Image (cartoon, rainbow, N blue to C red):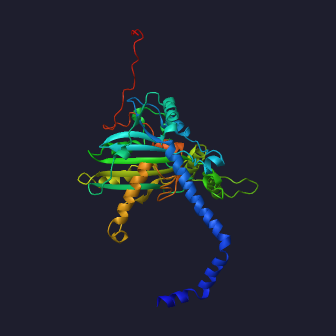
Amino acid sequence: MFDQFIALFLQGPFQSVFGALFRFLPVWMPFFMFAVFYQVWMRYIRTKYLHEQGTILLEFKIPKEMFKSPVAMEIVLAGLSQPGVGSYIDVFFKGRVRPWFSLELVSIGGQVHFFMWTQKKFKNFIESQVYSQFPTVEIHEVSDYALQTVYTPEEMKMWGMQLKLTKSDIIPIKSYIDYGMDKDPKEEFKIDPITPMLEYLGSLKQAEQVWIQILIQPHRKETLKDGRLQTKNDWKADMKKEVEKIMKDSLVKPEKDKPPTLGGLSETQKDTINAMQRSVTKTPFDTMIRGIYIAPKDNFNPANITGLTGTFKQYGSGNLNGFAPNFTTNYDYPWQDFKGRREEKGKRKLFDAYRRRSFFNPPYKNFHGRPFVLTTEELATIYHFPGQVASTPTFSRISSKKAEAPSNLPL
């Protein structure tokens, strides 16, 4: 029976296809082998380069009196935009890639922390950037909380997600400017969109942990140096086209001998266009946002899953963009994962990807999604040092003023 199937398979159209492939083997095989070699080589050389750089985790201790608006954080983040990768020798023989950073909001037993993960060579640069805008903030190099945590399914439960934008990334999210924080109002009148997130993080119980990771990499036009045979334009070109399309669709037909007008623009469209035109002047970053909730089985509270997804709702609106889960570690229906193996595999992979801060490069390149573009204005909305309007009890702050040593001390 098997012999008959093979004989049938080798007849007719199958014989023609395989015969053609065999005849043109000297033509396509070198290209195939080169493609395989290129993928293996680039993975090896980039992994080697990244391993040699070394990484550190910096924690920011925020003072009690913080009156800076998110504009200051926007300036800090703009300084992280270093999209260059060097020469072709640097890319294809040294494995150099665009640098990326991880902005992290973490709650460990209800204690809220601000972290930034980076390569060791950027430590002094980041410190100078932060101190230039926040001279009273303390910066400490600390042990990596993610590497110190071991996920054991027998003793712990975990839920994780990765976010996506609800609309095209050429449409911005609701930023701190939309909340009026650029006008620098008094503390009692501020509406800071990061406050609900800090309140949620501070509400966790002992032994519970929530990790929020914002991975950013400078956005740019991608070419051969980025592994592309065909050039990919940056997102600003698409944004300009969208603004032109909205304007064109809103043109009112002119009367005789009169120019067309934009009388057809609604207030919502005007707000959207203003936000887009403001974004196109800002520095863009390729972005991925992850969230993980982990706790011992006896302490795991499913309500905190809803809390984790809900902390991003205030950044969305009907006419602008917003966030929604793109990938989660659970499945909606039992027939999708009868024995729970796919779910457990997904949890382990997401946990490992988080610890490695891996998304833009192997081993978890484009893990369950594609990066979306956020500008410094949008990133500073999600990640900035809050003022006194954020009064979360478990968000510890340091003294704002540091006393100097008396000038008459004996030497």
State the image coordinates of residue 157 (x, y, percent, origin top left).
30, 55
* Residue 267 in view of the camera: no
Q: Residue at x 37, y 30 (%)?
A: 64
Quadrant in which residue 27 is drawn:
bottom right
Left of 264 or right of it: where is 186? left
Q: Where is 21 relative to 13, above or below?
A: above
**Percent coordinates x, y for residue 120 in the rendering:** 49, 38
Q: Is residue 355 left or right of residue 97?
A: left
Q: Nearer the viewer, residue 34 or 168?
A: 34
Seen from the viewer's position, the closer of residues 353 and 132 is 353
Task: Indicate left or right for 106 with 10 as reference.
Answer: left
Q: How many marks?
A: 0
List the single residue furthest toward the left. Answer: 298
Give me the residue at 59% from left, 47% from top. 94
* Residue 253 visible within the image: yes
Could you say which quadrant of the image residue 336 lies in?
A: bottom left
Image quarter of the C terminus: top left
| Residue 388, percent from left and from top | 38, 33
Corner quadrant of residue 375: top right
Q: In this orientation, which residue lies closer to the viewer: 17 or 315?
A: 17
Residue 264 placement (x, y as % from top left)? 61, 55
Q: Nearer the viewer, residue 86 or 136?
A: 86
Say whether residue 88 is left or right of residue 98. Answer: right
